[in-house]
């Protein structure tokens, strides 16, 4: 059995069917390339074959992309020279795709056979790069299908000709959303954009392609014709020049230079546009090799593709029967409860949304209506879908409506007493098997579980705000939480299509535990007279979406002050953040509560648009004459977070470094190019990390003290993914 098979019809059309053995979706493997190559050779050499159709044997999909082992195998193929292995491997695949593209033409572009590609559905990555090499792409009208080149999202770029072909097909400007942002389209939108040529009824797909193949004597791609000019202008054409200047500014502005793939992609397009097509492919292969040799791409692929998917598929799910949620009760219809009700209803669950007053419950439900209205405006939802979703939510004050719920998610005020009362009342109305989850962001789960007679059924399901946008859900096990509760939480997160991590109960769990020191380190620097712009920009140049001062404005200063007071009360003399509190309490006293009050570390205009940093800050905390260098600021911000992640691992709060890495990127945008805190430590090396911690400790204090685990690993020269690969955290 092979992944590609060919059938030659009496009408002269050879149909090559891609059907990856043992997989539900086609993926390109190292072994499949020569099979495809051989079939193409056969069909091109056979005089009876007039044209070729490449299609998929999988119902409703074409291909999901490339088996990532292909990259590893290419790297290994040239012994101790992985870059050579990659370059050679890439040039071989270019050879095969180029053969398809030229369809057997001679040097004078004569005698080529038409080759069509039929996409029954989703075609991603190499699954779209192969069609791009064909002469005509037919897509079935399948609204669920996603077509495009999402490689940039995991730290690489379309490096099997997709970059060069798409830029030449549509011009650099038009191609940029698909290449630089990884934008995916359904078949109709793909046709509008010029990604595919025809959209047909699913049943007509092959017939239409056959008709075209038989009607078409020979096709020459525009770039194989003499005098080809790139749409939109080549780099030295005035219009092309503007495109590239603009694109370069956009890429650098967006990535702050922290993501190697975007820059490499742009270089491949720019340099490729200056030379003939085959040379352009070679340039693309060189840049792709460069990106694949960067540890960032390995780390990003591992966290954002392999491990994220493993966690979503239940890598850490206890062995328990299916816990699919049918009816969920959401307690509290405020900001979080309203969002939780929305995502649950959209996932098809029956939802009971409870608040103290009917109008509060109704307001919570109206959040779903508003969300669906926005979706309808953007063509992403329909009136029908809106009605169906709203019909699934019962907004009420009546606890009796909770009867039959198999999961409760509590999102009332952050107060132990209020939560305990709600817990007790709810448990009177639900069956003994119902799992009770709290969305608390700061209160210990074990403490809150005391309000329940069945603490084994009590768990934390911690969402991030806004619920419908944030992809991570942090599941927290209290000391007595049982496996069925964990399985329930994981099955629920799977239903709402988010990514879960499972951690143990400790102050601020995992995510907030790491975010708070990041914010605090930024605030400390303000107190020391470091320029606020240096602090925020240092973070952005590390790849963080927002710097710590901007982040605190977004999340609100009074929330920070509230957390500081509660933490101080709980920790007593051990409390380490007096210097930070001075600033945060002062800001609170000044009424500068952040974006919500249109005044924080930044000034805002009346429409809420961020202006410059507030001048009053410099009056209270004058800039020191001696500003630190960028790397020192960046290391302070970085180590403040990663050391907390290491401590969380050391203390058993985190059980799996994969969750630490994936969680950090999805919850607070931790420098995605690094693959997460543990991947970053592996990239810089544990010996250097420990040495740097020693220096930071001496200069800035014991919060940078090297954790024992990191010290031990540094002494042994270990990496996190090396050391923990034998345990369950293997990537
Ligand atoms: P919120 O103030 O917007 O909403 C709380 C809602 O609970 C209010 O509508 C209130 O009327 C209702 N409520 C209070 N007591 C109730 C009771 N006895 N019965 C029924 N309803 C009751 O607060 P929020 O921001 O939605 O936060 C809710 C919970 O989620 C808190 O525990 C908070 O720590 C947690 N959380 C918040 C965020 C965030 O970014 N806001 C993020 C993660 C977790």
Image (spheres, rainbow, N blue to C red):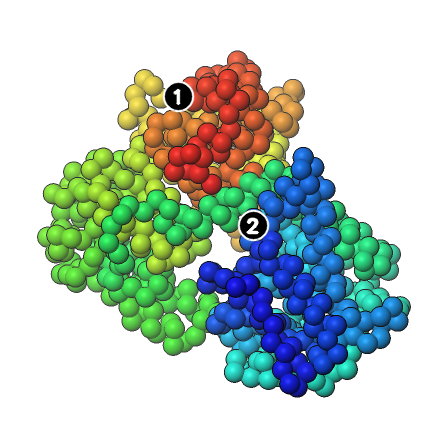
582 relative to 278 in the view: left or right: left
Q: Is residue 727 above or below residue 231?
A: above
User: Which residue ends up furthest to the top in the rendered image?
Assistant: 698
The mark that comes first in sequence, 2 or 1, is 2
The residue at the point 48 percent across, 28 percent down is 640
Q: Which mark is residue 701?
A: none
Name the residue: 29% across, 71% down. Answer: 391
Viewer-proximal residue among 592 and 192: 192
Closer mark to the observer between disc 2 and disc 1: 2
Secondary structure beneath label 2: loop
| Few, some or many residues within 10 Å of mark 1 (<14, 14–19, 20+) | some
Q: Is residue 77 visible?
A: yes
Residues tagged 2 and 1 counted as in contact (Cβ below 8 A): no
User: What is the C-alpha distance between the residues marked 2 and 1?
Assistant: 45 Å
- Mark 2 surroundings within 10 Å by alpha-carbon count, few (fewer than 14), some (14 through 19), many (20 or more): some
Residue 357: image location, x then y, percent: 22, 58
Pointer 1 residue Cβ closer than 8 Å to ligand 1? no
Which residue is tagged 1?
A: 576
Residue 1 at x, y = what percent? 52, 64
Which residue in the protein does label 2 denote?
A: 68
- Position of 263 with respect to 527 (left or right) is right
- The answer to which quarter of the image holds residue 502 is top left
Q: Residue at x 63, y 27 (%)?
A: 631
Report if residue 589 is visible in the image.
no
Judge whether 215 appears above or below 166 on screen: below
């Amino acid at each position: 059995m092979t992944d590609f098979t060919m059938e030659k019809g009496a009408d002269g059309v050879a149909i090559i069917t891609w059907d990856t053995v043992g997989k539900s979706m086609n993926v390109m493997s190292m072994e499949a390339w020569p099979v495809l190559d051989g079939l193409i050779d056969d069909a091109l050499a056979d005089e009876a074959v007039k044209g070729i159709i490449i299609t998929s044997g999988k119902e409703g999909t074409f291909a999901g992309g490339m088996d990532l082992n292909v990259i590893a195998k290419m790297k290994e193929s040239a012994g101790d020279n992985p870059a050579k292995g990659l370059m050679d491997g890439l040039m071989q695949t270019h050879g095969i795709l180029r053969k398809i593209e030229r369809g057997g033409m001679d040097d004078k572009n004569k005698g080529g056979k038409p080759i069509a590609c039929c996409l029954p559905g989703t075609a991603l990555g190499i699954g779209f790069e192969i069609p791009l090499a064909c002469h005509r792409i037919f897509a079935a009208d399948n609204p669920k299908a996603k077509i495009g080149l999402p490689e940039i999202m995991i730290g690489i770029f379309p490096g099997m000709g997709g970059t060069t072909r798409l830029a030449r097909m549509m011009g650099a400007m038009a191609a940029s959303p698909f290449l630089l942002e990884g934008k995916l389209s359904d078949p109709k939108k793909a046709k509008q954009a010029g990604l595919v040529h025809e959209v047909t009824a699913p049943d007509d797909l092959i017939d239409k392609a056959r008709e075209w193949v038989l009607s078409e004597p020979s096709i020459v791609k525009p770039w194989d014709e003499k005098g080809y000019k790139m749409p939109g202008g080549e780099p030295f054409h005035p219009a092309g020049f503007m495109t590239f200047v603009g694109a370069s500014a956009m890429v650098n502005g967006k990535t702050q230079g922290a993501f190697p793939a975007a820059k490499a992609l742009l270089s491949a397009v720019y340099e490729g546009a200056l030379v003939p097509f085959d040379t352009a492919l070679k340039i693309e292969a060189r840049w792709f090799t460069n990106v694949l040799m960067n540890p960032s791409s390995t780390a990003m692929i591992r966290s954002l593709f392999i491990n994220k998917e493993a966690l979503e598929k239940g890598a850490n799910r206890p062995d328990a029967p299916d816990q699919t949620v049918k009816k969920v009760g959401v307690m509290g219809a405020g900001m979080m409860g309203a969002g939780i009700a929305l995502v649950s209803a959209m996932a098809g669950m029956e939802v009971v949304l409870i608040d103290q007053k009917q109008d509060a419950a109704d307001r919570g439900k109206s959040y779903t209506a508003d969300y669906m209205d926005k979706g309808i405006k953007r063509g992403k939802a329909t009136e029908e879908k809106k009605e169906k979703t709203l019909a699934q939510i019962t907004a009420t004050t009546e606890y009796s409506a909770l009867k039959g719920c198999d999961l409760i998610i509590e999102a009332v005020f952050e107060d132990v007493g209020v939560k305990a009362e709600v817990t007790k009342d709810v448990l009177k109305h639900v069956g003994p098997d119902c799992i009770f989850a709290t969305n608390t962001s700061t209160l210990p789960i074990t403490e809150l579980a005391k309000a329940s007679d069945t603490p084994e059924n009590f768990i934390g399901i911690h969402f991030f705000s806004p619920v419908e946008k944030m992809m991570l859900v942090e599941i927290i096990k209290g000391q007595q939480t049982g496996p069925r509760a964990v399985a329930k939480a994981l099955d629920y997160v799977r239903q709402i299509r988010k990514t879960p991590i499972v951690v143990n109960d400790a102050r601020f769990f995992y995510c907030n535990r790491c975010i708070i020191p990041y914010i605090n380190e930024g605030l400390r620097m303000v107190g020391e007279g470091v320029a606020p712009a240096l602090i925020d920009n240092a973070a952005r140049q590390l790849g963080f979406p927002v710097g710590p001062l901007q982040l605190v404005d977004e999340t609100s200063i009074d929330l920070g002050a509230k957390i500081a007071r509660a933490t101080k009360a709980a920790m007593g003399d051990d409390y380490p953040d007096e210097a930070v509190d001075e600033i945060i309490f002062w800001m609170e006293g000044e009424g500068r509560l952040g974006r919500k009050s249109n005044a924080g570390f930044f000034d805002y205009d009346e429409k809420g648009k961020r202006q410059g940093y507030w001048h009053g800050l410099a009056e209270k905390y004058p800039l020191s004459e001696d500003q630190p260098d960028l790397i020192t600021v960046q290391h302070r911000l970085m180590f403040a977070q990663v050391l907390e992640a290491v401590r969380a691992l050391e203390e058993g709060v985190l059980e799996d470094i994969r969750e630490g890495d994936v969680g950090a990127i999805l919850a607070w945008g931790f420098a995605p190019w690094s693959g997460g805190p543990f991947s970053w430590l592996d990239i810089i090396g544990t010996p250097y990390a420990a040495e740097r911690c020693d220096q930071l400790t001496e200069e800035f204090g014991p919060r940078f003290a090297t954790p024992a685990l990191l010290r031990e690993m540094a002494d042994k020269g270990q990496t996190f993914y090396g050391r923990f690969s034998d345990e369950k955290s293997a990537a």
